[in-house]
Image (spheres, rainbow, N blue to C red):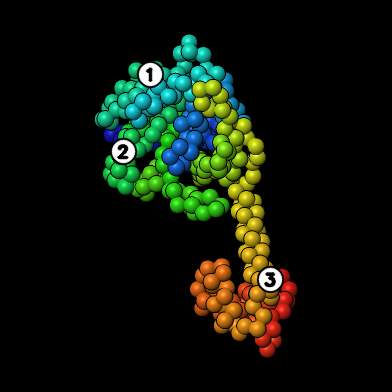
Amino acid sequence: MSATPTLYTLAELRAVRKPPFRVPGLIHRDLTGIAGVPYAGKSALAASLAMGVVGGSFLGRDWLTPPDRVLLVCADVGTHLQMGDRLVGMGMAETTTGVVVTPTAPAKAGAWAALSDRAGLTPSSLVIIDNLSAIVPDYNDSKACGEFFGCLRDAFISKGISVVVLLHMTEKATQYGPARLQPLGSTAISASLRHVIYVVPKGDGLLEVVTRGNDLEEPVALTVQMLSGAGGPSGFTVMAEVLVRERGASRKAKRATETLDRRAQKADWIVTNCQGRSKKATAEALAAKFGGAVSTYAKDLQPGRALGKMVVLEATAWSRLGTG
């Protein structure tokens, strides 16, 4: 933290203000997190990001201010060698001098600034840290997390150098993806990140990439295909892009449709298999066939309830009504 705070007039603030993104909607000028479960493809995305130093785009979007130099801090054991393979596999020449890689993360605050100087970074440079857990093993240690992000601010961000940090996210998931998109660990992590890219693997190299951040006009969700080469990932192709709010509405409609389909299946099964049974006996049969509590089915079979809108019991005969 600076001993002498800088003061600005409003006019001075407007004069020094810069666009918030280096890559529109994806990479923030200050600090960006790339969050995902282990083996989601975060390191491959980091390599693709580093390709910006040789003119590459990132997930189909061009850099507004391409990096003149990229420092990759590969803190996990052996990952610096893997990163070299990834960069070459994506087409970077071995003679490229704009990328420097270190397998060691500084242990003290001042050492981060010294690393910046040794790497020859400028305000147009980019720092990629892979990954947070190798530097701060206890994600729930608010003090350690706060100190780490403070080092990044002092050594890089305050000098105009953009930083990207790879980190883990919650692994709790539903059939539609993670139950909640958020970094794993202390709230100090979420509070420090200006912008986050969440990476959700969908299988067969397909990823869902979702953006979150205060400077976004609207969060977007990208469907991305990871391309495979001889030595590993060779790049990414964006297959689709949708606004998150539109995706949410679509998923809500899909869930509603699936719920109706499941209810219709049960209603048809009742008419076929439960003739001559009382509501109580039918509820017991449903629980045995589809799982769930007998009491829940007994309630759902009442008129106007979930199944009661689809079937009706007259004496001991079940008949089908509408679609619910």
Q: Quadrant of residue 102?
A: top left
Rounded to the nearest whole Å, what is the CA distance between mark 2 and mark 1? 23 Å
- Residue under circle 1? 119
Question: What secondary structure is marked by label 2?
Answer: loop
Q: Is residue 81 left or right of residue 297?
A: left
Q: Look at discs 2 and 1 and give the one toward the viewer.
A: 2
Dot 3 crowding, Cα within 10 Å, few <14, some 14–19, many 20+: some
- Residue under circle 2? 136
User: Can see residue 153?
Assistant: no
The front one of 265 and 208 is 265
3 and 2 marks in contact (CB < 8 Å): no
Name the residue: 67% across, 80% down: 275
Label whose residue precedes the other's in the sequence (1 or 3): 1
Name the residue: 36% across, 33% down: 152
Name the residue: 26% across, 30% down: 108
- Residue under circle 3? 268
- How many numbered circles are shown? 3
- Of all residues, the one furthest to the top in this rendering is 95
Question: Which amino acid lies under the numbered mark 2 shown in the image of this protein?
Answer: Val
Label whose residue precedes the other's in the sequence (2 or 1): 1
Quadrant of the snapshot with the N terminus: top left
Up the image or down, 142 lies above or below 61; here it is below
Report x, y in % for residue 270: 65, 74
Label whose residue precedes the other's in the sequence (3 or 2): 2
Report x, y in % for residue 220: 59, 44
Quadrant of the snapshot with the C terminus: bottom right
Question: Which amino acid lies under the numbered mark 3 shown in the image of this protein?
Answer: Asp
Dot 1 crowding, Cα within 10 Å, few <14, some 14–19, many 20+: some
Question: Which amino acid lies under the numbered mark 1 shown in the image of this protein?
Answer: Ala
Rounded to the nearest whole Å, what is the CA distance between mark 1 and mark 3? 69 Å
Up the image or down, 171 lies above or below 167; here it is below
